[in-house]
Image (cartoon, rainbow, N blue to C red):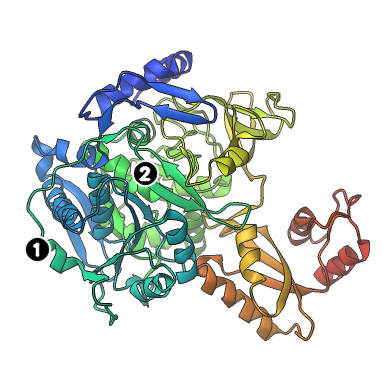
Amino acid sequence: MMDRTTYDGVRKAALADPEEFWAARARVGLHWFSPFRTTLEWQAPFARWFADGTTNACYNCLDRHLTGWRKNKAALIWEGEEYQQRILTYQELHRRVVQFAAALRGLGYGQGDRAILYLPMIPEAAVAMLACARLGIIHSVVFAGFSAEALRTRIDDLGATLAITADAGRRRGRIVPLKKNLDDALSECPGVRHSIVYRHTGAEIEMRERRDLEWADLVAGAEAECPAVPVPSEHPLFVLYTSGTTGKPKGVVHSTAGYLVQVQATMEWVFDLRDDDTYWCTADIGWVTGHSYIIYGPLAMGATTVMYEGAPDWPRPDRFWEIIAKYRVNVFYTSPTAIRSFIRQGDEHPNRHDLSSLRLLGSVGEPINPSAWNWYNTVIGKSRCPIVDTWWQTETGSILLSPSPGAVETKPGSATLPLPGIDAAIFNLKGEPVPDGQQGYLVLRKPWPSMLRGLYGDPERYRENYWSRYPGVYFTGDAAHRDSDGYFWVLGRVDDVINVSGHRMSTMEVESVMVRHPAVAEAAAVGRPDELKGQALVVFATLKGGATPTPALGEELRQWVGQEIGGFARPEEVRMVDGLPKTRSGKIMRRLLRELVTNRHVAGDTTTLEDFSVLAKLSASDEDE
C-alpha cells in the first residue's frame, strides 16, 4: 500500500514516459520466453504492445507459481449453489489444465483456432479458459444466461470450430439446459467440429456421435505433458462479445501480453492484494470482469480467488455473507445492483455473520450511488474498509479509474482518479477539455496496454465506434465531470446502450429481436432509472394490422425477448402504442421516449419532431397509468 506522495510520483512518472513505465512493469510482471525490445507501436487507432516478445498467459497464471511455496497454495475456491465445495491448489489446477490442453491438442486444435465456451460458474470454466490459452486457442466465453440464438450469432461471427459446454447449470434451484441450447445453436453452425461436454448436474442430454465428446473420457485418455506454447505478445487471448448500437454484438479482441500486464498491475494498485488474502469477485466469467478479476488477474498474481456458482440470495438472502464468513474473504468486489438488493433485504442478514475478515471492498459495473456507497461502507465494511469504486469497460480490459487504497481519499459516488499510465480527460463536442465541474464526454488520450485491439473481423466498425468522434482519442461513450480535486464522476452512457444490473444491452439488438415477432411492426427500446437495477428496460412497440394490444400479448412480447437474447434482457415493460416519435428523416427520437419514461413528460427540444400528435398520445397514455 502506497501513501499519496509515492502514488502521485508513480502517476506523474507514468504520464511523463508511459512507454518506459509499462516496459518496466512488463519485464518484472511477466515471464517471457523471448524478451521484447519494442514497447509500443502506435498507428492510431491500432496499438501493438511488446510486439516482438513471446509469452503465454497460462504459463504466467500457473506454471511460474509451481517452483516455490505457492504450488500448494489454494488457487481456486469453488462454492456450488447446493453448498458443494472444491479447492484446487496451484499444482492441482495446473495438472487439470495440462490434461485438458493435451486432450484439445490430441483433437487437432492449436494456435489460432477459435473456441466458444458456454459454461456455468464451475472450476472447469477456468480450466477450459487456461487450457485454450496454453495452446494459443482464441477463446470466447458466452454468458450461460444467453439463449441459443444469441449463442449462434457469436459462434458464426467468431468462426469457431470448437465448443465447450456442460450438460446444464444451476440457477436459483433450477436447471439451465446448456447442452440443449448449444445443440439448438449448432444446428445452424456446421463449422463446429467438436462439442466437449462436462457432466455437472447429471441432467439428461443427447450426445451426437462424432461431434459430441465427454470431457471425462478425453481427459482420461490424454497425454500427461503439454507444455505452454510461446505466442507473440499480440496474439489474441480472447474475444468477448458486447452489445453495440447496430444490433449486431461486437467481438472485442484482447491481446495476451498487454492485457495481462495491466490486469496484474491493477490487482496491486486497486486491491492492494497480499499473498495471504482470500479474494472474491462475484461477477460471472461470461463478462469481462470475470475474465480479468476472477481468472487472469488474480492467478497472474498468485492469489486465492473464490468462484461462486449461484445467485446472491439463494437459497437464503444471506448467502454472500455466509460465504465471506466461511472462507474468511479479505477483498470483496461486487456490483451496485447487488448492493442495492442487499439494502432492500435488510441489515439483519449481513449482521448475522462475522465479516471481520474483510479489509477492502470494491464496486464495479456502473456508478455507485452515494446512499448505496454509505450502506456498503457502514453495514458491510463497519466503516473500516476502504471502498474502491472502479470504472472501466469490456473494451478497456482492466480498471482505469479507481481510488488506490491508502493513497487516494474516496468520495461516495466518484471513481476518483485515473490509475498510473492512464491519460483521461473530459471533452466537449468540439474536442476541447471542459472546465472542472462541467459535464462532457469521458475520453482517453493515450493508448494503454490492456486496450482492445479491435473488433473481430471488423476494423472499420472499431474505428467508427471508438475513434471517429475525436481522431486519435478513444471515445468511451460515457458522460462525466471532474471536480476541483481532479476527481472523475462518471454519469452513465451517452449512446443507445442500456445497462441493466450491470448487463450492457444494445437498444438495436433488443429492437431487432422485437420486430421479428409476427405481431410487431416497429419497436424502440429505452432505459429508465431503476433503484435496484440501475436501469430498467422499457420497449415501445407498434403492432401490425390485425394484432390487438392486450395484456397477454404484452407478456408474450416480454417473454419473446427473454427467449431470444436471455432472461436478463426481458423488458420490465412493453408498451403497445399507435406510433413512435420520429424526426422528419424517419429516425426514432429515443431521447423523447427516455424523458417520458423517466419524468412522465417531455420538456426537451422537440423542434425536429415530425408528428406532434404521436407525442401527445404517448404523454396522455403515460399520465393515465
* Residue occupying image coordinates x 48% and y 17%: 15
Q: Nearer the viewer, mark 1 or mark 2?
A: 1
Kind of residue sitting beneath label 2: Ser
SS for callout 2: helix
Question: What quarter of the picture does the N terminus occupy?
Answer: top left
**Callout 1 crowding tier (Cα within 10 Å): few <14, some 14–19, many ≥20:** few
On the image, the x and y values in percent for residue 404 come to: 42, 30
Residue 436 visible from this viewpoint: yes
Specify the quadrant of the image occupied by residue 99.
bottom left
**Callout 2 crowding tier (Cα within 10 Å): few <14, some 14–19, many ≥20:** many
Q: Is residue 263 left or right of residue 396?
A: left
On the image, the x and y values in percent for residue 423 come to: 53, 24
On the image, the x and y values in percent for residue 365 come to: 50, 48
Residue 214 drawn above or below residue 361: below
SS for callout 1: loop
The one of 157 and 30 positioned closer to us in this rendering: 157
N-terminal of the two: label 1 or label 2?
Answer: 1
Kind of residue sitting beneath label 1: Gly
- State how far apart marks 1 and 2 are (Cα): 32 Å
Q: Which mark, residue 292? A: 2
Q: Which mark, residue 221? A: 1
Please report contact status of discs 1 and 2: CB closer than 8 Å, yes or no: no
Specify the quadrant of the image occupied by residue 26.
top left
Q: Is residue 596 left or right of residue 173?
A: right
Q: Which mark, residue 263? A: none
Q: Is residue 583 left or right of residue 307?
A: right
Residue 530 visible from this viewpoint: no
On the image, the x and y values in percent for residue 76 come to: 22, 51
